[in-house]
């Protein structure tokens, strides 16, 4: 069976744009000035426009190529690895295979997202998305221009074990649509759905700079991974959320937003007194310092417990 490649983001785009416009107008009519800031929204839109230009190139030359090479490399090119070792050539296009692929896509996103927050050079890419001090559908457009380079590496295992590359790409699109829908402050708690889905309230927690909320709720669609791996935090209406990042770029210039953390890493590496410190400044958790001048999220949260 030959799959018809459907790009969920393409078909959902009119709805998503309509939601963004409706939210913007509603916030202005209600006088909710904390929801949208025009300069911030323009900066987010420019980041999204840049990502829109780069994304097709990356998908063509990195994602698609990598996924197809991995899919073919393990079967049948190299002695039929899947056939001879796992006992099958590839997975079918059955409806339940799509569901399994989407669930495993979600698991891949969880670990990508968690590493984005705990490995500094990856955080330098991902910090772009968290840099806005406002939480709205416009913030969903504030996408990294560099994270897309390494993102496919976290999903390549899916075609390796036998999911068709086109199926994986579609599941990635479904994940992206859901992620966009999470970025609104106007959605209330969704009752029983909160038990297994990542909802807007749960994702608000993820975007907060409140110490108790840092590095929580990394899931894309399902929250079961956060519950299993210890990064789950429920939304508490008693906590007044502050959005943004601890070390803000303090700029609406998209190029500053895209590069400011890389500059900070380079500055720290140049000041390192030995290889270990230089290595940790790049691959250690954000906030790490040899003297304890700055603290990691885990260190900050330990002080909160005390």
Image (cartoon, grey):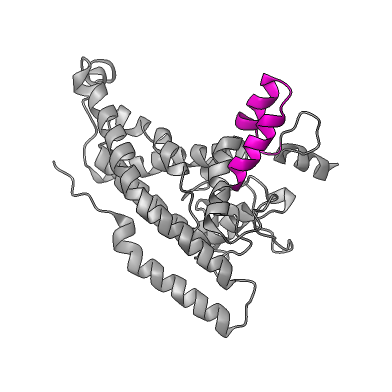
Horizontal and vertical percent for residue 197?
A: 50, 53
Residue in the picture at 50% in, 80% down = 25
In this view, 48 is above or below 286: below
Q: Quadrant location of residue 73? A: top left
Q: Nearer the viewer, residue 231 or 73?
A: 73
**Magenta stretch mostly in which secondary structure?**
helix
Horizontal and vertical percent for residue 156?
A: 36, 32
Q: Nearer the viewer, residue 274 or 109?
A: 274
In this view, 257 is above or below 147: below
Horizontal and vertical percent for residue 213?
A: 68, 50
**The N terminus: image quadrant:** top left
In this view, 228 is above or below 241: above
Residue 183 visible? The answer is: no
Residue in the picture at 57% in, 69% down = 39
Residue in the picture at 64% in, 53% down = 249
Tell me if residue 35 is in the magenta stretch.
no
Residue 165 visible? The answer is: yes
**The C terminus: image quadrant:** top right
Q: Residue furthest bottom?
A: 29
Residue in the picture at 60% in, 52% down = 206
Span shown in magenta: 260-287
- Answer with left or right where residue 120 lies relative to residue 242: left
Tell me if residue 267 is in the magenta stretch.
yes
Q: Report the label total.
A: 0
């Amino acid at each position: 069976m030959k799959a018809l490649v459907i790009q969920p983001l393409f078909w959902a785009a009119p709805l998503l744009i309509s939601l963004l416009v409706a939210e913007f107008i509603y916030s202005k009519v209600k006088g909710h000035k904390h929801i949208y800031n025009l300069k911030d929204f323009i900066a987010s839109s420019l980041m999204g426009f840049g990502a829109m230009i780069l994304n097709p190139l990356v998908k063509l030359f990195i994602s698609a190529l990598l996924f197809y090479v991995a899919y073919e490399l393990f079967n049948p090119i190299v002695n039929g690895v899947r056939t001879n070792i796992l006992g099958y050539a590839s997975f079918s296009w059955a409806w339940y295979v799509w569901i399994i692929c989407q669930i495993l896509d979600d698991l891949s996103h969880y670990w990508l997202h968690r590493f984005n927050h705990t490995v500094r050079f990856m955080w330098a890419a991902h910090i772009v998305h968290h840099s806005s001090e406002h939480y709205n559908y416009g913030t969903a457009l504030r996408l990294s221009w560099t994270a897309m380079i390494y993102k496919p590496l976290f999903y390549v295992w899916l075609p390796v074990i036998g999911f068709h590359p086109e199926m994986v790409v579609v599941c990635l699109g479904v994940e992206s649509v859901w992620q966009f829908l999470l970025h609104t402050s106007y959605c209330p708690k969704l009752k029983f759905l909160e038990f297994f889905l990542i909802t807007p309230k749960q994702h608000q927690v993820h975007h907060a700079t409140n110490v108790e909320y840092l590095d929580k709720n990394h899931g894309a669609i399902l929250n079961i991974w956060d519950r299993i791996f210890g990064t789950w935090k429920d939304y508490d209406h008693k906590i007044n959320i502050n959005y943004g990042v601890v070390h803000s770029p303090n700029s609406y210039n998209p190029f500053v937003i895209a590069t400011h953390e890389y500059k900070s890493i380079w500055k720290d590496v140049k000041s390192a007194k030995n290889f270990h410190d230089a290595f940790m400044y790049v691959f250690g958790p954000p906030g790490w310092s040899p003297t304890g001048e700055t603290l990691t999220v885990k260190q900050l949260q330990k002080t909160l417990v005390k």
